[in-house]
Image: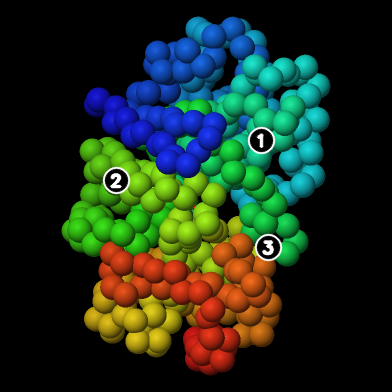
Amino acid sequence: MKSKIINVSFNNNFENSSYQIFIGTGILSNCDKILGKFLKNKKVILIHDTFFSLEKGGNKNFINFVEAIKKSTMNVKLISISGGDKTKNIFELNRVLEKSLSYEIDRDSLIIAFGGGVIGDIAGFASSVLLRGINYIQIPTTLLSQVDSSVGGKTGINSRKGKNLIGSFHQPIAVIADIDIMDSLPKREFLAGLVEVIKYGLIKDKSFFDYLEENYKEILNYNQLKLKKIISKSCEIKSEIIKNDEKENGQRAILNLGHTFGHAIESFGKYDGTIIHGEAVSIGICLAFKLSLKMGFCDQSETERVINFFEKLKLPTSFKHIKNFSITASKILEKFKYDKKNRNNQLTFILNKKIGESFIKNDMDIDILTKFLNEEI
Ligand code: GLY
């Protein structure tokens, strides 16, 4: 299958950091053709999910990838990180930083992140601060990281106060999304990634949402052509949105549909795997549509259509799925205070006028929100 290449570029980026996303099958085993020019004789720190550890017998895609990069450089050091949001903390970041420095990196050295969103976020953040910034390449291995976290340069770790509150914008120099790697992905992770795919249809492209509704069965069966299509479409929509707003001073925020609720819900779960990011965002998107309906922005049939689709996919859609988190309206409002979209002490939410049209709602009325939460919890 021929790879699809998507260009990511920024209209206001002084460093001119445009890059390409390669999407297809069999790319990892042949990546010397794509990555050779970046790697040539450089020192590479390959930060990967422990899941792929060579000591554990490895994974064929990872082994092929390591062999392929060795065609361009023999100077490769490996650092493994266990995936899962519990790892995304300052202690793990420090371990990665110290270990990278112990390999005597210089400013020409390169980091490669091989794993899901957690690996990409930590490795990307480490790259942004090591020696005041070195280049990195993203090799996302989950659906979620292929369609979202590997693209756009958001890097970071979680704080006790909430998700992704410590981080930087640091663009990768290339992204490779190889669909073959998806065969090692548990179904639960795949479904959670699909939530971010659906999100793109909901925020910007109704016909893409229609397509997902019509084709979801083949997508759930890992049909490679359909996967390539939905990953490409997601990355195209994302790159179109971020091109004029690299650092989220405006329109990029709509990519956060469902994430204000989602991040708060995740932090109640203490990142112990009871609920994973995409599942929390699934609840968050359904709540965002219900709130849009309640505030008169969106009509009932559209809201029901969205919730029905998530239900059909067996994804969680309301607080009733997380009863044991003992969430209350006041506790969740406290979490919202730390949302990065807030400005001047006012809460900002992403709401919808209809499927395919999200907008930024600044200055959210706390009374409406409290009443809404009390009805939903
Ligand atoms: N994940 C949302 C963004 O990259 O802006």
The secondary structure type at the circle numbered 3 is strand
Give the quarter of the figure containing the C terminus.
bottom right
**Residue type (three-letter) at the residue carrying disc 2:** Lys
Q: Where is residue 200 drawn, in percent x and y?
A: 35, 56
Callout 1 crowding tier (Cα within 10 Å): few <14, some 14–19, many ≥20:
many
Callout 2 crowding tier (Cα within 10 Å): few <14, some 14–19, many ≥20:
some
Choose the circle earlier in sequence order: 1 or 3.
1
Mark 2 or mark 1, whichever is nearer to me? 1
The residue pinned by badge 2 equals: 233
Choose the circle earlier in sequence order: 2 or 1.
1
The residue pinned by badge 1 equals: 128
| Nearer the observer, 137 or 361 | 361
The secondary structure type at the circle numbered 2 is helix
| Nearer the observer, 217 or 92 | 92
Q: Residue at x 47, y 42 (%)?
A: 12
* Horizontal arrangement in the rendering, residue 233 relative to residue 271 (left or right): left
Q: Where is residue 368 drawn, in percent x and y?
A: 51, 90
Question: What numbered label is drawn on residue 162?
Answer: 3
Callout 3 crowding tier (Cα within 10 Å): few <14, some 14–19, many ≥20:
many
Q: Where is residue 245 drawn, in percent x and y?
A: 47, 50
| Nearer the observer, 207 or 79 | 207
Q: Residue at x 61, y 69 (%)?
A: 343
